Image (cartoon, grey):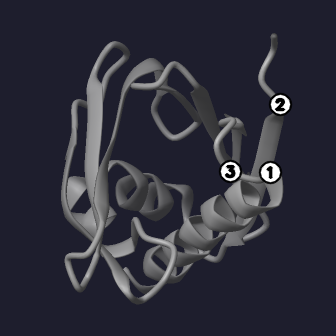
Amino acid sequence: MTPQKITVETLVNASIDKVWQAWITPEHITQWNFASDDWCCPSASVEARQGGRHAARMEAKDGSIGFDFEGTYEVFEEKDRVALRMSDGRLAETTFTPEGGGTRVVTEFDAETENDIALQRDGWQAILNSFKRHAEQV
């Protein structure tokens, strides 16, 4: 069965160069890779190439829960598109498109079966919103 696709997007008021660096640099990822202020991303690593690994630790600030988000880049096209095959087999593809004076960031990902579609969309959109705030400040 083909998994349902979910799409989230934002327009970041920053150049493609700044947006790209904020997306793929571990020091930046740890500053935005969480859906709410009571969560954090204490560590991240990126092998910036096709076949490279991506890993980020996401956890509640109170230490009550956390998980590792990991995958392998099936596509890594600098400042254009990345496709990450997550450790559970799902695919997340993100594109970066200059638009006006900013950059449109669109992520389409395979839904998982444990959580409601709206919950998944809202969670990924919240993380993307966090990314937007961070990328616009760097």
At mark 3, the secondary structure is: loop
The residue at the point 59 percent across, 26 percent down is 91
Amino acid type, callout 1: Ile
Residue with the mark numbered 3: 115
Q: Looking at the image, can residue 104 be seen?
A: no
Query: Given contact means CB atoms under 8 Å apart, are the residues at marks 2 and 1 in contact?
Result: yes
Residue 70, placed above or below residue 60: above
Label 3 or label 1, whichever lies nearer to me, is 3
Which residue is at a point 32% across and 22% down the rendered structure image? 49
Residue 41 appears left or right of 89: left
Along the line of sight, the residue nearer the viewer: 86 or 48: 86
- Separation of marks 3 and 2 at Cα, in angstroms: 12 Å
Task: Check residue 117 in the rendering and tell me which mark sits there, or answer none.
Answer: 1
Q: CA distance from mark 3 to mark 1?
A: 6 Å
- Numbered circle sitting on residue 4: 2
Q: Earlier in the sequence, mark 2 or mark 1?
A: 2
| Image vertical order of residue 102 relative to residue 76, above or below | below
The quarter of the picture where residue 83 lies is: top right
Q: Position of residue 111 (x, y in %)?
A: 71, 37
* Residue 76 sits above or below residue 7 on the image: above
The answer to whether residue 74 is visible is: yes
Spatial CA span between label 2 and label 1: 9 Å
Q: Quadrant of residue 95?
A: top right
Q: Earlier in the sequence, mark 3 or mark 2?
A: 2
Residue 27 horizontal/vertical position (percent): 19, 63
* Figure quadrant of residue 48: top left
Give amino acid for label 3: Asn
Mark 2: secondary structure: loop
Q: What label sits on residue 78 in the rendered view? A: none
